[in-house]
Image (cartoon, helix red, strand yellow):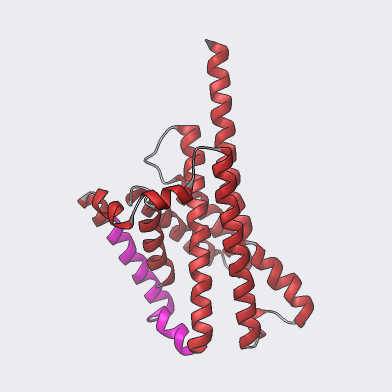
């Protein structure tokens, strides 16, 4: 009996590591942009992203989005091969409307409250509407490609949350704590701290990541509904 328990625990531990590997893999895919911008493109152009012309910016976003989407899909397929978790199957079987109906009144209140707080925070941070300011600054063409880039980024952030959640639930057998949000807070927050050179930015991003992870649980893990609200919180 003791041997069987140890084997079972080891399997659970290994499964958790597989999920954590998928979560960190999604974060690594996001990091491709650093390689593209600071190594590949810098050696080609001789200057960084802030000095790109319109077509260089568009090319950067297109290449980033292609790698992000393909990388994310590969991780999803790889996870489905290693475990019982198939996110593509989940997307097909669970509709956005179904997820909305399954949520309790309290969950809706908490989700909407968190969304509103994120929007208020963004409004204060940008001293107005982020969307309008970026549209005026970039123009219609750049704005369109930049927001496609944002949509792809949210896709990967959701993967970090989902697989991070599965990992820690395997280990601790507790499905009430937003472990995925904690993983995003640590990875995404530290990433922004290092790339932006600002601890405040890192902390701000980490808090946002934790809220995103909480949103995933509040939507009862409905991927479509989670993605919708993450887009609202992150993009708007």
Q: Is residue 35 above or below residue 17?
A: below
Residue 123 occupies quadrant: bottom left
Quarter of the image that includes the C terminus:
bottom left
Who's the residue at 73% across and 82% down the image? Answer: 47
Q: Residue furthest left?
A: 105
Q: Which residues are magenta?
A: 111-136
- 23 in the magenta segment: no
Who's the residue at 55% across and 58% down the image? Answer: 188
- 127 in the magenta segment: yes
Q: Nearer the viewer, residue 63 or 14?
A: 63
Q: Residue 35: x and y, percent?
A: 71, 66
Q: Nearer the viewer, residue 116 or 81?
A: 81
Q: Residue 31: x and y, percent?
A: 64, 61
Who's the residue at 57% across and 68% down the image? Answer: 198
* 86 displayed left or right of 123: right
* Prevailing secondary structure of the magenta residues: helix
Q: Is residue 112 visible?
A: yes
Question: What number of labels is visible?
Answer: 0
Q: Residue furthest top?
A: 1
* 112 displayed left or right of 54: left
Who's the residue at 46% across and 51% down the image? Answer: 181
Q: Nearer the viewer, residue 83 or 13?
A: 83
Residue 195 occupies quadrant: bottom right
Q: Is residue 200 visible?
A: no
Q: Residue 146: x and y, percent?
A: 52, 77
Q: Residue 178: x and y, percent?
A: 42, 46
């Amino acid at each position: 009996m003791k041997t069987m328990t140890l084997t079972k625990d080891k399997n659970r531990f290994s499964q958790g590591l597989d999920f954590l590997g998928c979560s960190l893999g999604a974060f690594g895919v996001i990091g491709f942009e650093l390689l593209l911008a600071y190594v590949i493109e810098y050696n080609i152009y001789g200057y960084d992203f802030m000095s790109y012309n319109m077509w260089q910016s568009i090319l950067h976003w297109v290449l980033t989005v292609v790698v992000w989407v393909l990388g994310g899909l590969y991780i999803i397929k790889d996870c489905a091969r290693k475990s019982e978790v198939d996110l593509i199957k989940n997307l097909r079987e669970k509709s956005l409307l179904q997820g909305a109906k399954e949520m309790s009144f309290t969950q809706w209140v908490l989700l909407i409250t968190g969304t509103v707080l994120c929007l208020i925070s963004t409004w204060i941070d940008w001293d107005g509407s982020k969307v309008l300011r970026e549209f005026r600054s970039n123009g219609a063409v750049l704005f369109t490609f930049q927001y496609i880039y944002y949509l792809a980024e949210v896709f990967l952030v959701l993967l970090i949350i989902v697989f991070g959640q599965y990992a820690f639930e395997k280990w601790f057998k507790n499905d009430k704590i937003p472990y995925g949000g904690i993983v995003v807070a640590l990875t995404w927050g530290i990433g922004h701290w290092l790339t932006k050179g600002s601890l405040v930015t890192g902390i701000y991003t980490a808090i946002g990541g934790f809220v995103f992870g909480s949103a995933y649980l509040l939507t009862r893990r409905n991927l479509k509904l989670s993605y919708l609200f993450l887009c609202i919180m992150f993009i708007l």
